[in-house]
Amino acid sequence: FGSFASNTHTEKSDIDLLIIKETDISFTKRAIEFIDLFSVFSEIDILVYTPSEFDRKINSADGFSKSLKSTL
């Protein structure tokens, strides 16, 4: 999602990566599992949701869900 997914990125853009997986790890600590990605992409935002969290998020009316829907 984000500027790369909507093809509006610039040289200053970061990569927004959303991962959906089953986990019991708290939301704030989930991205640590994917820390190796920072060696490939230094400017990356990683969000990790469980399937049920993602379903709730994508069906909400907030700006984040609108951004996601526009790139799915």
Image (cartoon, rainbow, N blue to C red):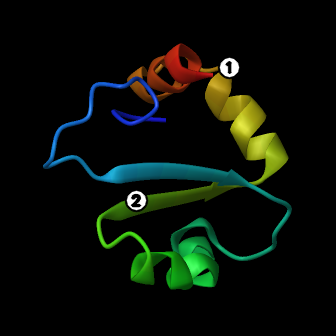
Question: 38 above or below 8?
Answer: below
At horizontal 82% and vertical 42% (from top left) the residue drawn is 52
Residue 44: quarter of image: bottom left
The residue located at (43%, 49%) in the rendering is: 16
Which amino acid, mark 2? Asp
Label disc, if present, on residue 36 of the rendered structure: none
Element carrying mark 2 = strand
Tell us which disc is closer to us: 1 or 2. 2
In whole angstroms, how far apart are the C-alphas of marks 1 and 2? 22 Å
Question: In the displayed structure, would residue 38 be above or below residue 6?
Answer: below
The disc labelled 1 sits on which kind of residue?
A: Asn
Decide if residue 22 is on the left or right side of residue 9: right
Q: Is residue 18 above or below residue 59?
A: below
Viewer-closest of 39 and 22? 39
Marks 1 & 2, CB-CB < 8 Å contact: no
**In front: 36, or 58?**
36
Please indicate whether residue 16 sits to the left or right of residue 55 in the image. left
Q: Dot 1: what SS?
A: loop
Question: Mark 1 or mark 2: which comes first in sequence?
Answer: 2
Which quadrant is the C terminus positioned in? top right
Residue 49 in the image, given as x and y percentages of width and height: 68, 53
Mark 2 neighbour class, 10 Å CA radius: few under 14, some 14 to 19, many 20 or more: few
Query: Which of the labelled discs sits on residue 59, or is there none?
Result: 1
**Residue 65 coordinates in the image, percent (x, y):** 53, 24
| Residue that mark 2 sits on | 45
